[in-house]
Amino acid sequence: MNVFVIPSWYDTGDKPHCGVFFAEQARALIRAGHRVHLLYPDLRFKLGGLPTGVFSLPGGVPGLFCRRRSLTPFWERGRWPQRRWMLEKLYRRAEQEWGRPDVVHLHACTMGVEAVWLCQKHRLPLVYTEHYSALMREPHGALREQLMRTLAGATVAAAVSRALQERLREFRADTCYIPNLVDAERFAPAPIPHGGVVFGTLGNLIPRKRVDLLLRAFAKAGLENARLRIGGDGPERERLERLTESLRLKDRVEFCGAVPYSRAPAFYNACNCLVSASEAETFGMTLIEALACGVPVLSARSGGPESIVVPGQNGWLVPVGDADALADGLREAAGRPFDPAALRADCIARFGEGVVVRQIEQAYQKAVYGYERA
């Protein structure tokens, strides 16, 4: 099929971690024989010296982006007509270069008003996959309107976890489940020798990730020979470093800074267990990447992880916000070995490229067939 993909966030040259899983999915679809091109309206609060106009996307995934400065930086609904204009401009150029698409695939409802408008104007079927973690709570204001209008306008709607699927089914009963996929060639076991037990956590250092809770649980666990590696950067880093000192963990906790995607496999392979203490996740990319590397996972029941972690089989689940339960999980993980090959095989069976691409293809076929019959 000829597929135009509209991500709600993406790297246009200055945000290398942004939208990585959208790019991986696009590459997987291309390997499966589809023609895939990304279209991204990059509407900015500040340009920071970056040029405006239409450009080819960086990073090797074919596509275009249009960069402009927002005329209404503090008014979300005011940005919708601006992005709609940008998306129309991108679509016309893309159609001229690559032909009319068979289907449009939108990732996340925050670009949904614009994508629905485009597809209605050009009479195109729209597949919509939701990823946005803010929807694990009750949406309000502009976000709620974006969600409602996207669900109403999409030909097929999907969520990346069972928890998010259940949430969206409150508004659209036929929402299906299509998880994110893992690049099993990139993420593979290659254990890095180290002494003792090493726990790792990887992600943006923001309040929702609850790395502060993980530090407190690590202190409670009393594992004197264990270390904790914290990968990622963000506004919480200084506060977390001060907390580490106050908990007297400085000698056993390492802040690794931002971990490029290319170095993520090495980060996982240097750990005995990957931990997520996050309070809300729609999926859990770091969890499936670690499992593909043969590393067990310990996670809070924050929504998405419940679709990934099978307690006793590939890791542990604990209540959100419970430092004592997380400390118990750390102690259990420190003394419980898993078979890396079995962890990897199970992960690929559920989240491997072939499995997930087939589910996406089924959604595309359903959208095209349903649109033609409508």
Image (spheres, grey):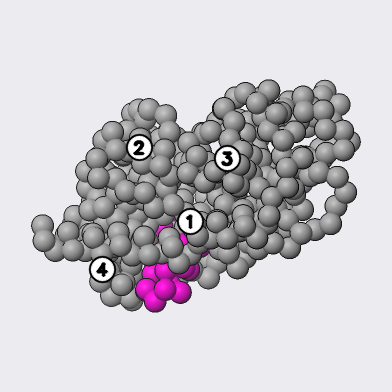
Say which residue appears at 88% left-offset and 49% top-offset.
195
Range drawn in magenta: 24-42
Residue with the mark numbered 2: 166
Vertical side of 197 occupied by 330: above or below: above
Looking at the picture, how far across and down is residue 369, in whole percent? 18, 63
Could you tell which of marks 3 and 1 lies nearer the N-terminus?
3
169 or 57: which is nearer to us? 169
Q: Does the magenta segment cover residue 41?
A: yes
Say which residue appears at 40% left-offset and 42% top-offset.
162
Q: Residues within 10 Å of mark 4 (few under 14, many from 20)?
A: some
Tag of residue 311: 3
Question: In terms of secondary structure, where does tag 4 sit?
Answer: loop
Residue with the mark numbered 1: 350
Front position among marks 3 and 1: 3
Looking at the picture, how far across and down is residue 120, in whole percent? 19, 55
Question: In terms of secondary structure, where does tag 2 sit?
Answer: helix
Could you tell which of marks 2 and 4 lies nearer the N-terminus?
4
Tag of residue 102: 4
Kindly report the distance in space between the C-alpha atoms of the residues bearing marks 4 and 3.
Answer: 41 Å
Q: Is residue 187 left or right of residue 358?
A: right
**Dot 4 amino acid type:** Asp
Kindly report the distance in space between the C-alpha atoms of the residues bearing marks 1 and 2.
Answer: 19 Å
Tag of residue 266: none
